[in-house]
């Protein structure tokens, strides 16, 4: 079964500094997608960044980038120049197509990021 | 503009009293999902619809059911809520099936059981 592990329940960073959130996953499949979602307090979950497993190049979206290590099954998120608005719960998620065309999106337990002014 | 709309934001029901949560979308997406997110836990997929085809997760309790009368609306019915069903319920959509399709989430409905 696929599992996603976020080993840091909470992290904090100073405004304008850089922070890295860790994520590891377990799967026997070769083709899948990985996502980072952000869930601010009492607000909807939004997609931050995604990575295709067959691509070696790490995905980048403005201040957000990932370090994808497929062999190690590691998918960390780096937030550069942290802003107060980055404070949220961050979820790492794994998604794969299953037999019969159904699909599975498995989330980690989340990391709560606090940004200090 | 909200694209995945969940109503109500907060729902309170009594132990054992059926409750329905609703989700609507303006994206015309084929796939709609329901997740359960308990406090300090990851969202857990309950089931999803691909168009009219219903796909239930193996460990979703029989107490939970869903309806999708048309493309825009999807309902989550809890037949006899127990205290353990108190959670945030998230609705999400994706344009199509396929693991490269991102999911768009609503704000969620927080369900409390008295």
Image (cartoon, coloured by chain):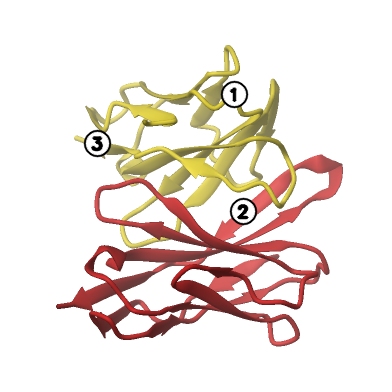
Which label sits in the foreground, 1 or 3? 1
Determine the chain carrying the residue at label 3.
B
Spot occupied by residue A114 in the image (x, y as percentages of width and height) = 24, 74
Q: Which of marks 3 and 2 is in front?
A: 2
Asked whether the residues under marks 3 and 2 belong to the same chain, the reply is: no
Label 3 crowd (10 A; few <14 / some 14-19 / many >=20): some
Question: Quick one: quadrant of the N terminus of chain B?
Answer: top left
- CB under 8 Å between callouts 1 and 2? no
Mark 1 or mark 3: name the one nearer the start of the chain.
1
Please state the horizontal and vertical placement of residue B77, each as a whole percent of the image: 45, 24
Q: Circle 3 sits in a helix, a strand or a loop, which is it?
A: strand
Q: Mark 1 highlights which residue? A: B28
Q: Colour of chain A?
A: red
Image quarter of the C terminus of chain B: top left
The residue located at (31%, 66%) in the rendering is A86
Q: Tell me where residue B90 sits by quadrant.
A: top left
The quadrant where residue B36 appears: top left
Mark 2, Cα crowd under 10 Å, few <14 / some 14-19 / many 20+, is some
Q: Which residue is drawn at 53% across and 75% down?
A: A65
Q: Which mark is residue B105?
A: none
Residue holding disc 2: A105
Q: In this view, does A69 lie above or below B79?
A: below
**How many numbered discs?**
3
Horizontal side of residue B12 vs B57, given as left or right: left
Up-down relation of residue B95 to residue A79 (above or below): above
Q: Chain B is drawn in which colour?
A: yellow
Q: How far apart are marks 3 and 2 (CA)?
A: 27 Å
Q: Residue furthest top?
A: B69
Q: At numbered mark 2, what does the secondary structure look like: helix, strand or loop?
A: strand
Chain of the residue that carries numbered disc 2 in the rendered image: A
Pointer 1: residues within 10 angstroms few (<14), some, or many (20+)? Answer: few
Residue A21 spot, x, y in % from top left: 44, 80
């Amino acid at each position: 079964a696929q599992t996603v592990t976020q080993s840091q329940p909470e992290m904090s960073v100073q405004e304008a500094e850089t922070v890295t959130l860790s994520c590891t996953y377990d799967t026997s499949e070769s083709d899948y997608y990985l996502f980072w979602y952000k869930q601010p307090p009492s607000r909807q979950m939004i997609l931050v960044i995604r990575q295709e497993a067959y691509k070696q190049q790490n995905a980048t979206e403005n201040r957000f980038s990932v370090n994808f290590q497929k062999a190690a099954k590691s998918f960390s998120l780096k937030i550069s120049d942290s802003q107060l608005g980055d404070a949220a719960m961050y979820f790492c998620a794994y998604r794969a197509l299953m037999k019969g065309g159904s699909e599975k999106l498995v989330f980690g337990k989340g990391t709560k990021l606090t940004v200090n002014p | 503009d909200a694209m995945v709309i969940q109503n109500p934001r907060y729902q309170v029901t009594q132990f054992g009293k059926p409750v329905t949560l609703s989700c609507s979308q303006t994206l015309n997406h084929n796939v709609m999902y329901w997740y359960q997110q308990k406090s300090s836990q990851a969202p857990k997929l309950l089931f999803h619809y691909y168009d009219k085809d219903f796909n239930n997760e193996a460990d979703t309790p029989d107490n939970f059911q869903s309806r999708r009368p048309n493309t825009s609306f999807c309902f989550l019915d809890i037949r006899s809520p127990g205290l353990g069903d108190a959670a945030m319920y998230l609705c999400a959509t994706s344009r199509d099936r396929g693991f490269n399709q991102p999911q768009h989430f609503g704000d969620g409905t927080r369900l409390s059981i008295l």
